[in-house]
Amino acid sequence: MRAPSPPPIIRARGVVKEFALGEQTVRAMAGVDLDVRAGEFVVVMGPSGSGKSTLLNMVGGLDRPTEGEIVVEGLDIATLDENALATYRRTTVGFVFQSFNLVPTMTARQNVEFPMMFAGRPPGARRARAEALLHAVGLGHRVDHRPVELSGGEQQRVAIARALANDPHILLGDEPTGNLDTRTGQEILRILSDLNTAGHTLVVVTHDSRLAEYAHRIVHMQDGRMQSEVVGARPWVDRRAASDPLADDGPVAPQGRPDRPLSPTEAPA
């Protein structure tokens, strides 16, 4: 007998978001339903003002819905108080933004360490994980550089490493290639794809049609509603069925030249 499918890692039902604009009430989301399975790479597309970034902010706990529920890993985040919501943002989700949002006075390593300070990790562990994550995204030689000394693509790599600092299961991207040239954007897309292959669930909102090449599913939004869903170029598989129970899941020793990018699973948690 086949085992029942697990519940989705993200489940949104009837999500409405309204806000005041002068004397008018604007409905940014008008009853959105969405399920995201663990290990899935979902791309949300739509014109500006369609509600896709608002949806991402709801899932990420940066904003609250006016109506409806958002359940992530069994937790209805719309009901959380501010302290519990801060814990959720710190431990469950990682954010990658279009504008990088790095602290300009901090080095790459310090930027990656920063979220771990709020998680209570000791300084030595923070430093070791930050350096391992920067190495994993190909910046092992730039750990002591500040954002002004890094290219746009390098800054986004730091931002991805920072998003992984507290080992979240879910990564949320808001136009992660929007400020990058074509070649650099392609490099960032490959990193995101590798993270998904390593087991992270990804939800990315974008105008970049190249993301469809890496997605399991593409969701189109307009006027605050889901308009359509299409299957992406990559087939999604249930990782429970695909996993090898005899496989060694321990860290893999780095091979090759010292500064090659590691897989995300090689960075110590």
Image (tube, helix red, strand yellow):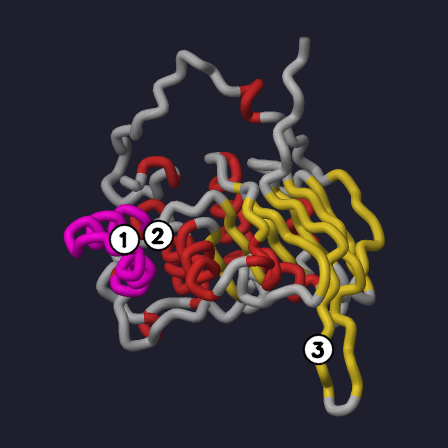
- How far from the left and from the top, in percent, is residue 29? 75, 65
Mark 3, mark 2: which one is toward the viewer?
A: 3
Cβ atoms under marks 1 and 2 closer than 8 Å: yes
* Three-letter code, disc 2: Ala
Q: Is residue 166 left or right of residue 1?
A: left
- Mark with earlier residue (3, 2): 3
Q: Is mark 1 on a helix, strand or loop?
A: helix
Q: Is mark 2 on a helix, strand or loop?
A: loop
Residue depicted at x 55% and y 47%:
75
Q: How far apart are marks 3 and 2 (CA)?
A: 33 Å
Quadrant where the N terminus is found in the figure: top right
Q: How far apart are marks 3 and 1 (CA)?
A: 38 Å
- The numbered disc on residue 130 is 1
Membership of 117 in magenta stretch: yes
Residues packed near mark 2 inside 10 Å, few (<14), some (14 to 19) or many (20 plus): many
Location of residue 60 with respect to 66 vertically, above or below: above
Q: What element carries label 3?
A: strand
Residue depicted at x 64% and y 16%:
3
- Mark with earlier residue (3, 1): 3
Q: Residue furthest left?
A: 124
Q: Is residue 208 left or right of residue 112?
A: right
* Residue labelled with disc 2: 165
- How far from the left and from the top, in percent, is residue 259? 27, 45
**Number of marks in picture:** 3
Q: In this view, does 126 lie to the left or right of 85?
A: left
- How far from the left and from the top, in percent, is residue 232? 72, 40
